[in-house]
Amino acid sequence: MKKQSFVANPLYDSVFKFMMEDEQVARTLLSALLKKDIVSVEMHPNEYSNVNKENDRISIFRIDFGAVVREKDGKEHLILIEVQKTWRSTEISRFRQYLGVQYENKRNIDVNGNSLPIVSIYILGHKVGKIKEPVVYVSRKYLDYDSKEITEGVPDPFVESLTHDSIIVQVPYLKGKARNRVEKILSVFDQTYIQDGDPQFVSVSGRDISEDKDMERIINRLAKAATISDIRMTMNIEDEIYSELENLDTKILSQKKALAQKDKQLAHQEEQLAHQEEQLAQQKELLRNTIKMLLETGKTPSEIADNLHLDIDDVNELI
């Protein structure tokens, strides 16, 4: 089935939250990212950062999920999935801060007293350094001194409690890519499909989602979001706040450049002053040697002052 329409942009916090509140949609997206079969998933309540002009957490949106995953051997276990999303490239410290909260949260302990495995998913509206892959997997490995993988006794609850895997999605590199299942699912985030220059909406025109019920459900969910007035209003607020954040970033950058220029000018002035002080010291030493020579010829300080057009006190100071 091909649809000639547009849907709400899931990079907006309000839209993303609405999309992920559908359990089947959340399971589809998370399963594709984790490359694991997710048996069940539950969004943890009150974990997301609301849009609030007086709260600068608007720049990062976070949702936590408890998920039962089925491994290739058929075994099932519970994990914690932390999804963080941001448009901005200046949030590393906050990512770390939120991750620290997860490690401290007593709710994330299983019945045996072990910390639940954590998988952090970062959906970024910006690029990460020079890495050009749209989806980057950072996985743990147990290695010995010779970098050989350890298989016996793995996974270990102690190690699992202290480390975690991460998945990084770089939205700018999605651009038309659908080489695999996860890229096809993530194509709804592709900002090259922005509708008529309005970032709140992305086009699904011409996308073939025939026989893909999961993609059809995601697109239908985003289409529904586009019709809900509260979500549309919240998107407008997000636009306003993001614009303010961009203006603030521009102002801060301008101030940093101005300070750097002032520092450069000050350094130049200090260099000139040091040079002038050095010249004065040399002139003073030359004058002292001249006075010494004149004294050796029998001239008095008063006569030297007259000859050199100096104050008598200055001559006496240099003697």
Image: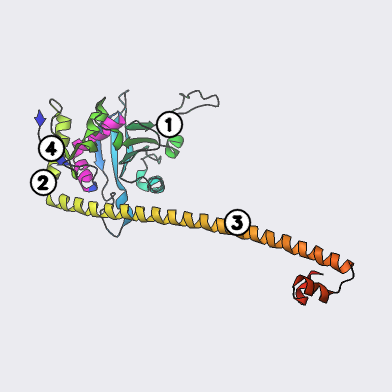
Lower sequence index among marks 2 and 4: 4
Lower sequence index among marks 3 and 2: 2
Residue 302: quadrant of the picture: bottom right
Name the residue rendered at 36%, 45% in the picture: 89
Q: As displayed, is residue 211 above or below residue 194?
A: above
Lower sequence index among marks 4 and 1: 1
Instruction: Identify the element where label 1 is drawn.
Output: loop
Residue 17: quadrant of the picture: top left
Q: Nearer the viewer, mark 1 or mark 3?
A: 3
Amino acid at the residue labelled 3:
Glu
Query: Which sits in the foreground, 257 or 46?
Result: 257
Amino acid at the residue labelled 1:
Arg
Residue that label 2 marks: 227
Q: Nearer the viewer, mark 4 or mark 3?
A: 3
Mark pair 2, 1: CA separation? 42 Å
Task: Determine whether label 4 and label 3 are within 8 Å by CB.
Answer: no
Residue that label 4 marks: 220
> Residue 207 magenta-drawn?
no
Instruction: Identify the element where label 3 is drawn.
Output: helix
Amino acid at the residue labelled 4:
Asn
Of the 4 image quadrants, the one containing the N terminus is top left
Name the residue rendered at 26%, 48% in the picture: 45
Query: Which sits in the foreground, 78 or 146?
Result: 146
Query: Which sits in the foreground, 112 or 283?
Result: 283
Residue that label 1 marks: 140
Instruction: Identify the element where label 4 is drawn.
Output: helix
> Residue 24 magenta-drawn?
yes
Lower sequence index among marks 2 and 1: 1
How far across and how far down the image is residue 2, in percent?
10, 29
User: Over which residues does the magenta segment extend?
Assistant: 14-34
Q: Main secondary structure of the magenta part?
A: helix
